[in-house]
Image: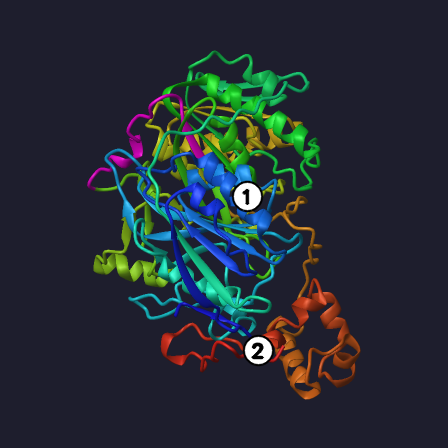
């Protein structure tokens, strides 16, 4: 088993088969339980016949269910987007989980489909109730160490594995077979009172075309624009994205990428990221419509957002363009719940029928333009020493990308960041640009920020247009492009600490540690064993070997102080791991 759930009682299983929405409407089995509806997951047939009728039947089913009912739906990403749009008004949306497909589905000139979507709704309001579930470590077949390098933090991790995220690559589901591994995981994930049974409903149906879901809005007013023309075909423009986009000729660009403010109260410069949700989506619909207008026929628009917001973008773009891909970027974020948020959607639509993707025609020897289209195979680690040794030995450790991107990591270290709270990693933008365009074509980013997209475009010999509202960020982007043209790497490590943060947690001052933080955390773990629980600050001051001021000065919170005391600790070698507890056992703290 690839997971370990704490204090769970595995649910029983009952299997049903339904062939029509009417049959679901007639179902009387509305007992409290966990319901999994597995819909067809064949990408060549992404939508069910009468998907609206299925959504209506699911709504009626939910209306008759008891308050604690959990409803899960496993299907293709476009089907999930439509169902989510229709059901989130009558059920509480909880999670969009991406599950790896056992057999990727490939088509010439297209990005292979590597994942299905698992929607989780509840009848009740509030946070999802589930067990704490960990995913077991995986090990590199070359060096026999964990595929992730945990560095000096091994004492803060569990001996079995890490807390589960909303991207499941350790298990798979088949496009046509019963999702047995998904069923097993849900039986443990929700194996707590009042649940006793998981009802698996296999839905059998045909397919049809995309339903029309309209959503439009008026353009809001903006500010005056200012243009910095770097040279022919290269422009950084300051101003409101809608006003600037309206000055760009129709059908003039080859690729548009948007990473909009998420309306999640981030501290962007000159941007109100707390707009009322209706106004926010009116504004989104307006610039999405403009991006569709400026694209050439057959070219792609890609929009990055959290899955629930991506559903809304999908709904609007479905009225204007042709669905192309739902790319999952596993970009692990801050731990804010017992299921770690890692699932980011890059929703791709083309203007009319999409062309074959330029980046998939790889040469025998990858060039700088195509190297980002190959990823390390999932089973291999990314330690520099192991990577170098594999290269010397000619190991077959690379694979062409599909639509599940797990190998691109966020910028976490301050030395790689400039003064912006939400910088994307340049490897992400190089991959998108290399995939959807060829040298000499043009790239547009209406929220260019400090220039990650346009810098990646210039590195790959693409023309670019970057639009940015903030004068501060616009100035940083101009400076970084100037550095690139003077032979400097704009993504290099730097000594200064940026002022902006992507986290509400206060940044620690730079200081010399008289005692290593690991030593202090292990001391707290010793005290925890002595008192039989997580110690208070007063107990650490009384029973500890080190001054309490070290804990106050070296850690951002008492939770970080107690990180090692909450868990077992781990090692990175396969044969030295701690004894694993059974499914029903709970860590001491």
Residue 510 sits in which quadrant?
Answer: bottom right
Marker disc for residue 209: none
Residue 589 to residue 530: above or below:
above
* Residue 115 shown left or right of residue 484 in the figure: left
How far from the left and from the top, in percent, is residue 379? 33, 61
Q: Residue at x 63, y 80 (%)?
A: 525
**Chief SS of the magenta region:** loop
Q: Residue at x 52, y 39 (%)?
A: 56
Task: Specify the color scheme.
Answer: rainbow
Q: Is the residue marked by circle 1 packed among few (<14), some (14-19), or many (20+) residues within 10 Å?
A: some
Q: Residue at x 65, y 85 (%)?
A: 529
Quadrant of the frame with the C terminus = bottom right
The magenta stretch is 347-364
Give the camera-side residue of 351 and 187: 187
Q: Is residue 587 visible to us here?
A: yes
Circle 2: element type = loop
Residue 358 part of the magenta segment? yes
Counting the numbered discs, the total is 2
Distance from disc 2 to disc 1, alpha carbons, whole Å, reads: 39 Å
How far from the left and from the top, in percent, is residue 182? 41, 59
- In the picture of the structure, the residue carrying the numbered disc 1 is 59
How far from the left and from the top, in percent, is residue 419? 63, 41
Q: Residue at x 50, y 22 (%)?
A: 291
- In the picture of the structure, the residue carrying the numbered disc 2 is 587
How far from the left and from the top, in percent, is residue 228? 56, 19
Give the camera-side residue of 187 and 459: 187
Give the camera-side residue of 130 and 23: 23
* Residue 430 shown left or right of residue 397 in the figure: right
């Amino acid at each position: 088993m690839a997971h370990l759930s704490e204090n769970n009682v595995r649910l029983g299983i009952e299997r049903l088969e339904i062939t029509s929405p009417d049959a679901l409407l007639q179902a009387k089995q509305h007992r409290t339980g966990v319901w999994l509806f597995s819909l067809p997951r064949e990408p060549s047939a992404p939508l069910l016949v009468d998907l609206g009728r299925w959504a209506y039947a699911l709504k009626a089913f939910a209306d008759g269910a008891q308050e604690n009912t959990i409803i899960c739906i496993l299907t293709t990403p476009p089907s999930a987007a439509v169902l989510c749009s229709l059901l989130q008004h009558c059920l509480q949306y909880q999670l969009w989980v991406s599950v790896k497909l056992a057999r990727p589905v490939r088509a010439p000139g297209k990005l292979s489909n590597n994942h299905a979507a698992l929607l989780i709704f509840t009848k009740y309001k509030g946070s999802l109730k589930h067990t704490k579930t960990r995913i077991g470590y995986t090990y590199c077949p070359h060096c026999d160490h964990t595929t992730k390098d945990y560095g000096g933090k091994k004492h803060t991790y569990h001996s079995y594995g890490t807390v589960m995220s909303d991207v499941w690559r350790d298990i798979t589901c088949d496009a046509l077979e019963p999702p047995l591994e998904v069923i097993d995981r849900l039986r443990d994930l929700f194996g707590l009172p009042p649940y006793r049974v998981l009802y698996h409903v296999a839905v059998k149906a045909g397919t049809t075309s995309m339903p029309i879901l309209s959503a439009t809005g008026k353009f809001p007013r903006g500010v005056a624009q200012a243009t910095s023309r770097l040279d022919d075909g290269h422009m950084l423009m300051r101003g409101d994205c809608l006003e600037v986009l309206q000055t760009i000729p129709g059908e003039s660009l080859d690729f548009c990428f948007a990473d909009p403010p998420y309306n999640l109260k981030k501290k962007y410069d000159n941007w109100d990221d707390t707009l009322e949700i209706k106004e926010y989506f009116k504004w989104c619909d307006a610039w999405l419509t403009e991006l569709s207008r400026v694209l050439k026929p057959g070219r792609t628009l890609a929009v990055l957002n959290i899955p629930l917001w991506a559903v809304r973008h999908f709904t609007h773009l479905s009225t204007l363009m042709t669905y192309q891909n739902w790319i999952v970027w596993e970009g692990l974020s801050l731990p804010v719940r017992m299921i770690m948020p890692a699932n980011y959607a890059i929703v791709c639509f083309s203007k009319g029928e999409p062309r074959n993707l330029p980046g998939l025609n790889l040469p025998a020897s990858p060039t700088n333009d195509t190297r980002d289209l190959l990823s390390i195979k999932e089973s291999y680690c990314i330690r520099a020493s192991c990577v170098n040794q594999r290269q010397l030995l000619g190991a077959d450790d690379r694979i062409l990308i599909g639509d599940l991107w797990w190998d691109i990591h966020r910028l976490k270290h301050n030395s790689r960041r400039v003064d912006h709270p939400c910088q994307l990693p340049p490897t992400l933008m190089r991959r998108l640009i290399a995939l959807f365009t060829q040298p000499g074509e043009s790239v547009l980013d209406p929220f260019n920020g400090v220039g990650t997209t346009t810098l990646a475009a210039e590195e790959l010999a693409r023309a670019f247009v970057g639009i940015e509202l903030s004068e501060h960020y616009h100035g940083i982007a101009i400076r970084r492009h100037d550095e690139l043209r003077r032979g400097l790497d704009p993504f290099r490590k730097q000594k200064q600490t940026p002022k902006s943060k992507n986290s509400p947690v206060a940044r620690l001052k730079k200081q010399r540690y008289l005692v290593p933080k690991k030593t202090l955390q292990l001391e707290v773990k010793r005290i925890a064993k002595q008192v039989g629980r997580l110690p208070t600050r007063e107990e650490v001051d009384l029973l500890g070997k080190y001054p309490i001021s070290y804990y106050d000065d070296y850690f951002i919170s008492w939770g970080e102080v107690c990180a090692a005391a909450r868990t077992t600790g781990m090692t990175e070698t396969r044969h030295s791991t701690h004894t694993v507890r059974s499914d029903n056992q709970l860590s001491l703290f």
